[in-house]
Amino acid sequence: MADINEKCYGSFGWRQFWENRIDILKEYDRLKGLNLNSPVRTSHGVALEAKIRDWLTTFLPKKYAVTSGYIIPDLVVDTYTLKHFDIIIYDQLQSPILWVEDTLDNSPIGAKKAIPAKYVYSVIEVKATLNKKHIADSISKLKEISELKEFLPSTFSCSSIFAEIGNDVPNNTSVLEGFIDCVDLVNYAGSLILRSDADETSSGQIVFSTIDKEVNLNPAVSLTKPIDNLDIYVNQTGQLKIAESCGGAALCATSSNTWSVTKLYSPYITKKGIYISLEWSHNSFTRFFIQLMSSLDGIKLKKEQLNFGQVYDRINRKDD
């Protein structure tokens, strides 16, 4: 694989975001490799959760803390079934810790904590592979938040992260239908897929919206494609050309007279008034976590508002 600096460049911090993603996947792959030959199955999905929690703890502003554990509603009840979540982001400065459960991970971040719902700003479910079962499982888990909705802050959001696309997933958009049920979630902020076999340098971001009518229905396109092979180029007159089905480009003004480009590959489906797109790019990892950080403060960023850590693609020139 060519040096990433030959393919991409970016705003300050982009290489650090790039390395963070690689570090998370290295730990996932290490445990996944141990599973192949071990009689005792070690969960690489659990390792992925722990690694993401660890990284978020260093990335997020210190007023937020990260844990796995329980969200506790402000209720007077005789019985209540506790709901455990993989990643809880909460207000570290204001929230009490109602109790702590130790786990095999003896680090402070490895313990399960019980957090009052009013201090919880985000929940993330983590799965090793994206396939129909794990999509359904993650959405089912996030639906449990509905029972807590009245106790959560107005800026609350939920999302999911998958390490990779499963080998059992067909290379078409059919798997995206599993995300249709996200319409029932509390402030669903999308999902992140860290990599695919088709292109380990790009990540995918699930983009969700409602639409007034069906448009173009479900295109018969591949679920993934290498970003560097997309037919997106600049012609002789300096115009950006997108000659790729489901191809696209995010533009950012990086100086007074210069635009930088992030190439996108976005297969999608529309069904029951819901639009679901899987947006692959070299920048999806950075964008997902900066949007998450901003949403904690109740800020909804537009793409052109994202500044540090952004990854841009070097665009080839060719004739039309």
Image (spheres, rainbow, N blue to C red):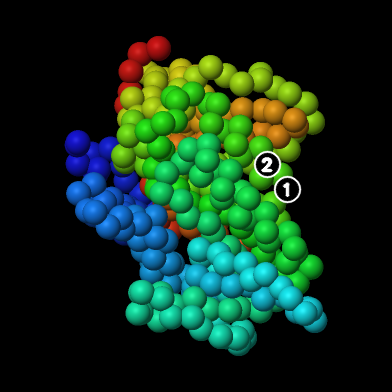
> What's under tag 1, amino acid-wise?
Asp
**Contact, mark 2 vs mark 1 (Cβ under 8 Å):** yes
- Image coordinates of residue 256 in percent, x first then y, are 48, 47
Which corner quadrant of the image does residue 171 belong to? top left
Real-space Cα separation, disc 2 to disc 1, in angstroms? 6 Å
Is 238 placed left or right of 174 in the picture?
left
- Image coordinates of residue 284 in percent, x first then y, are 45, 46
Please identify the quadrant where the C terminus is shown: top left
CA neighbours of label 1 inside 10 A, class few (<14), some (14 to 19), many (20+): few
Q: Which residue is mark 2?
A: 181
Which corner quadrant of the image does residue 77 belong to? bottom right
What's the mark number on residue 184?
A: 1
- Image coordinates of residue 229 in percent, x first then y, are 33, 25
Query: Which sits in the foreground, 76 or 3?
Result: 76
What's the mark number on residue 78?
A: none
CA neighbours of label 2 inside 10 A, class few (<14), some (14 to 19), many (20+): some
SS assignment at label 1: helix
Residue shown at 36% from the left, 49% from the top: 10
Which corner quadrant of the image does residue 69 belong to? bottom right
Q: Residue 247: in sight, yes or no?
A: no
